[in-house]
Amino acid sequence: MRCCACLSQQQTLQCSPSKMAAEEESNSRAPCLNFSSPGPLGNAQSSNNAHSSPATNEGSAGATGGAPRTAGHSNPQPGPDRGGGTDVRVENSPNRQHTTPQSAGQSATAARAPTVAGGASGAATNMTASSVESPNIPSSLPSSPASAAVLVYREPVYNWQATKNTVKERFAFLFNNEVLSDVHFLVGKGMGVQRIPAHRFALAVGSAVFDAMFNGGMATTSTEIELPDVEPAAFLALLKFLYSDEVQIGPETVMTTLYTAKKYAVPALEAHCVEFLKKNLRADNAFMLLTQARLFDEPQLASLCLENIDKNTVDALAAEGFTDIDLDTLVAVLERDTLGVREVRLFGAAVRWAEAETQRQQYQPTPENKRKVLGKALVLIRFPLMTIEEFAAGPAQSGILSDQEVVSLFLHFTVNPKPHVEFIDRPRCCLRGKECSITRFGQVESRWGYSGTSDCIRFSVNRRIFVVGFGLYGSIHGPTDYQVNIQVIHTDSNTVLGQNDTGFSCDGSSNTFRVMFKEPVEILPSVNYIACATLKGPDSHYGTKGMRKVTHEAPATGTKTCFTFCYAAGNNNGTSVEDGQIPEVIFYT
C-alpha cells in the first residue's frame, strides 16, 4: 500500500518514464513520511496565490543532480532518483490558480507547501527523503553540521508558523490563502465571480451567521458556497477584518461592506463603516447616505444626515444624488420643521425629483404623473408659507395642483377670514431644539381697540436667539378672525428683518394666539429691535402689570435668556412696557 506522499509524487512524475521508474524504485524502499492528516504540509489543494514562485537556485540545482548538495550529505545519488526536480515542476505548473498576491515570503510558502505532500521538493527535501530511505539513518532530525545548515533553509519555506510570532500574524497569513483552507466562496455574479478560499473555524469564531452555517442544526457540508448578492471586494474586506482586525474600506466599497457586515452579523465592522460615513458626510452626499442609512437601519447615521440637510438644505437639494432618493426618504425630509430653505425652492426640488421618478417608472413627465409619483409628499409642501407672488409664478402654473387647490390658496393669501386649506401653514425653522417663549405681562384686562395703527415694543436680549413669532391677544366678543401684519425691525437702521401678512382665529378667551413668521428672524445680543403688530378686527384683551426684564431659563441646560423691554418712540397704539398688546415672544436659542 502506497502512502499519500508517494501517490502525489506519482502524479507529479507521470509524464516522464524515467521518473516513473524512479517512483517504482522508491516504492521498494522504506515507507515514505505520511502527511495524510490535514495541515499546512498535508494540504494537497492547488495554490490560489497570485504569483507562482520561480524555481529557486536550490530547486534548479536539485533538478540537475547533486552539484549543489553538501559534501557531507548522506545520500549523494542524482537528483532525479530522489525526485529532486519535483519542486521545479510544481512551482512552474501552468495549472496553478491565481488570486490576490500575498507578500513574497507568503507566496513562496503557499506555493511550496503542497509539494511536500507529494513527497519531494528540491534540495531542501533531499535531507528528509534520504533520512527515510536509508536504513542506516534514523528518521529523527540529523545532528550533523551539514544537515543543520539544510534545516536553516527549510524552516522559513515550509514551517511558516515559525516565522509568525503572534496569533494575529498567523491568522493574517491565512487570509485569502489556500493553506489549510477547507471551504471556498464563489462571490459575485456573471463575469465578476471570484473564488475565495477560507477557513470554517476562523469564520465561525468571528460571525454567528457563519457559525450557524457550518456548525448549526442545518449546517452545510458543501465545500463551495455561492454568494451572488455580495461584492467580492466587500467580502474580502469582511474576511480581512475577521482574520486580522484590519479595516479596509473606502468611498467606493463602504456601502457594500456595510451590507456584508450586516448580513454576516459582524457589528464591529458595521461600526467602522458607519464611522467612516460620518467622517465623510457632506451636503452633496447627505441624501444618498440618508437613503442607505434608512435601508440598513442605521438610525444614528440617518439622524446625522438629517441634521446636515437641515444646516445645508439648499446645497443638499441641489446635489445630484437628491433626485435618486426614494419616496419615503423624500417624505421624511419634507416633514421636518427645521429645513433652512424657502418653501418655493423646496417645491422646485420636489418637482425635479418627480421628473426623475416618472422616468424611473417609465411614465410620461406630465403634471398629472408628477402629482401621482409625489403622492403623500405633495401635501407636505407648505404652500401657505410662500408669498402670493412666489405662489403665482410657480406652483399655481405648474399644473400639479388642482384648480380647487389653487383657488383656495389664493383666497388664503388675500382674504380674511382665511378658508381652510389642506396644506400645512406651520413655519419651518432652520433650528434644532425646543421652542421657547416668554410672557411680559402679569395680568389680562379688557378692552384694547384698533384703528390701523401698529402696536410696538422695543426689546433687546443678552444672547443670540431666533424669533419665530408672537403671541397676541384676541377678541373680547367671542370667536373672531383677525387680519394681522407682524414685523421685527432693526431700531438703528429701521430695516425690516422679518414680516408676515397673515391672520388668526380666536375663541373669545383671554388666552394668547400664535402668529408666526415664515422664516426665523435672527436677534443678536445687546442690539435694539422693535416688535410690531398691526391688527384689523374688534376690540381685544390686553395685558397689564408689565415687566421690564423677563428671563427664560432652559430646563435641560440652565441657560438663561434675558429680555429687556423699553418704550418704542412714536405712535404705537398705546402699547408700552406696562400694558398693551404683544404679550409673548416665541423664539429658539
Image: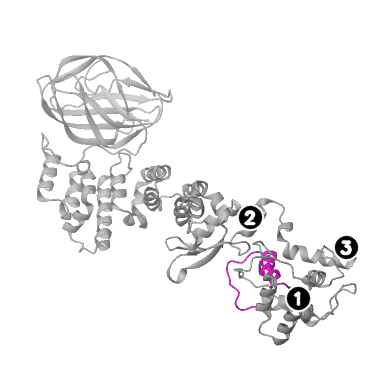
- Name the residue at 81% across, 72% down: 130
- Badge number at residue 59: 1
Front tag of 3 and 1: 3
Cα separation between marks 3 and 2: 32 Å
Quarter occupied by the C terminus: top left
Cα separation between marks 2 and 1: 29 Å
- 188 versus 69 height, above or below: above
First to last magenta residue range: 93-120
Three-letter code for the amino acid on which mark 1 is drawn: Gly
Q: Residues within 10 Å of mark 3 (few under 14, many from 20)?
A: few
Q: Are marks 3 and 2 in contact (CB under 8 Å)?
A: no
Residue 494 lies left or right of residue 302; in this view the side is left
Q: Are marks 2 and 1 in contact (CB under 8 Å)?
A: no
Q: Quadrant of residue 25?
A: bottom right
Q: Which of the two discs, 3 and 1, labels the residue nearer the N terminus?
A: 1
Res. 113 in view: yes
Helix or strand or loop: what does disc 1 sit on? helix
Q: Position of residue 368 (x, y in %)?
A: 16, 57
Is 234 contained in the magenta span?
Answer: no
Residue 40 lies left or right of residue 443; in this view the side is right
Q: Quadrant of residue 425?
A: top left
Q: Position of residue 316 (x, y in %)?
A: 36, 50
Helix or strand or loop: what does disc 3 sit on? loop
- 409 versus 471 height, above or below: below
What residue did someone put label 3 on?
A: 143
